[in-house]
Amino acid sequence: MNIKESRWLPPLPFFFGSPVLLWQLFFFYLPLLLLTLSSILTFSPLGNFEGLTLDRLLLFLQPVYAKVILSSLLLALSNALICFFIGYPIAYFLAFKAKKMKPLFLFFLIVPFWINFLLHVYAWFFVLEKEGFLNWLLLSLGIMDQPIPFLNSLFAILLMMVYYYLPFMILPLYSSLEQFNIQLIEASQDLGAKGWQTLLYILLPLSKGGIMAGFFLVFIPSFGEFAIPELMGGDKWLFVGNVVSQYILSETEGALGAAFTLVSALALLLAALLLYKGLNFLLKPKGEHA
């Protein structure tokens, strides 16, 4: 009886994991295959297959497109870093200091997910426009003599992205820090460690999982962000999401859009790998660097 049961045990993991495998197959691997084929296959105006080509892929290795990809990577990295420096103290406060008010603070942190994205954008329009709240505040305080056009600027794009993606950084950091043993901090203080030493050598390495998750939850979608640069930056700034949308929405240049998407995805994969290696090195405990 036990022998028969053991024969049925191996298929069970595959059976229970098959929905996930099917989901990945139809919504990740199959679109990726179609994207690759659209990039390298050529067809006649009548729809007849003509052959394979790498011209579309090589086109996007030109400096003008490399600049767009690099700008998107820098924007995504800047967004992730700012979200981290803002989000880590907030996550620390929620994990160790909020106490009875923690459910209320978490509620306010999650509420933005329930609000339509466009409402967030239009709310910031009223803050950043020339007659908006920010200019009114700066003029009232005497910091400047005339309004500043914050909209259609890189500042507006980055500010909106930090605002929108900040919860994606805070929540994994909070989840990681909540499992942290507070007695380790107390022990380090008893041993004479200063606050910054406790942070660098204890808190950050032991919360590496949350930091990694937060960085990638912010960095990867920020790279291909389309709506925020389009709405907050106007036509002054060009990033990967804008270029892809222009090609894909075109009736005749969909193949170029697929090729640029593929090249951008490869660049993002390489950048994500470097980011992972860098974070893994920086967050190692002090003794492991030797």
Image (cartoon, grey):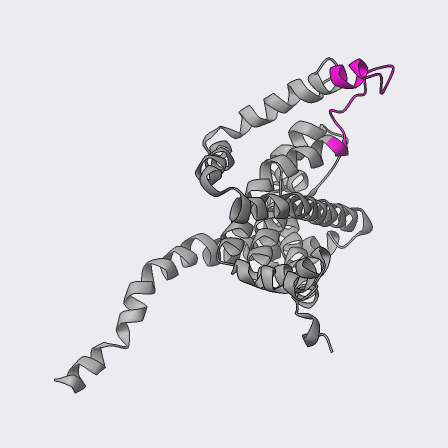
The answer to whether 21 appears left or right of 150 in the picture is: left
Q: Is residue 12 visible?
A: yes
Residue visible at 55% across and 56% down in the picture? 210
In this view, the residue in front, 57 or 267, is 267
The x and y percentages for residue 132 are 70, 16
On the image, the x and y values in percent for residue 196 come to: 72, 56
Q: What x and y, as percent, mark residue 143?
A: 85, 20
Residue 58: image quadrant is bottom right
Relative depth, front residue between 79 and 53: 79
Whether 11 is drawn above or below 207: the answer is below
In the rendered image, the quadrant that contains the C terminus is: bottom right
Q: Residue furthest left?
A: 1
Question: Quick check: is 97 in the magenta stretch?
Answer: no
Residue projecting furthest to the bottom: 3
Q: Position of residue 272 (x, y in %)?
A: 64, 59
User: Where's the N terminus, which quadrant?
Assistant: bottom left
Which span is picked out in magenta? 135-155
